[in-house]
Image (cartoon, helix red, strand yellow):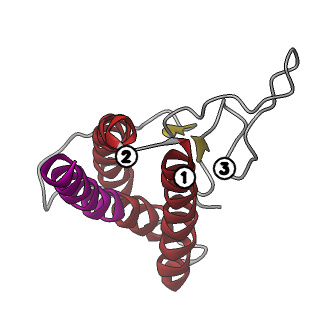
Amino acid sequence: MIRIAATATLIAAGGCGIACAPALSASHGRKTAPSPPVIRESFTPLPCSGRPGYRNTLQEEGCAEQRILATDSQINALSRSVFSLLADNAARRRLIAAQAAWFAYRRADCMSRSDLFEGGTLASVVDAQCSAERNDERVRQLRAFRSDLARNG
């Protein structure tokens, strides 16, 4: 079993999970304002130790997990920044939906890439390294989006 498979949740629109409708206010029957999307991993990361090129699979996985957590933090901060620059709640809900779709893509793509090593010790390493790479790409995308919003806003 792959250790980090399905290990993160994207908390969006009031903490109701990856795909959720905006919460309704009980007192007035109105939609509540959306909250910025947040990625939270559910794994406890392994330590990143050993020298590159001399690490065993658990050490490689730990290093990738550390990268995932670091880039998750960057993604969350960038998402908050982009969220605050968006013009209205409709645009914010679209960002929430985009983040949920991106996260589902990350999970499915990386699980698929790890299938090459299914049943072996490299499967979890490939999955973790892929997730870290996808996070790096998302950081670049969100930085560009934030820059565009700031320039055009």
Asked if the magenta segment contains residue 138, the reply would be: yes
Q: Residue at x 23, y 51 (%)?
A: 149
- Three-letter code, disc 2: Glu
Q: Is residue 38 left or right of residue 66?
A: right
In the picture as drawn, the residue positioned furthest to the bottom comes out as: 116
Quarter of the figure that contains the N terminus: bottom right
Q: Disc 2 designates what residue?
A: 65
Question: Reading the chain from its start, which is encountered first: label 1 or label 3?
Answer: 1
**Cα distance between the residues tagged 2 and 3:** 21 Å
Residue 104: give x, y in percent of width and height.
Answer: 58, 64
Q: Disc 1 designates what residue?
A: 4
Query: CB atoms at circles 1 and 2 under 8 Å apart?
Result: yes
Q: Main secondary structure of the magenta part?
A: helix
Q: Which residues are magenta?
A: 132-153
Q: Disc 3 designates what residue?
A: 18
Residue 117: give x, y in percent of width and height.
Answer: 50, 79
Residue 8 vs residue 43, the one in the foreground: 8
Q: Is residue 149 left or right of residue 14?
A: left
Location of residue 142 by image quarter: bottom left
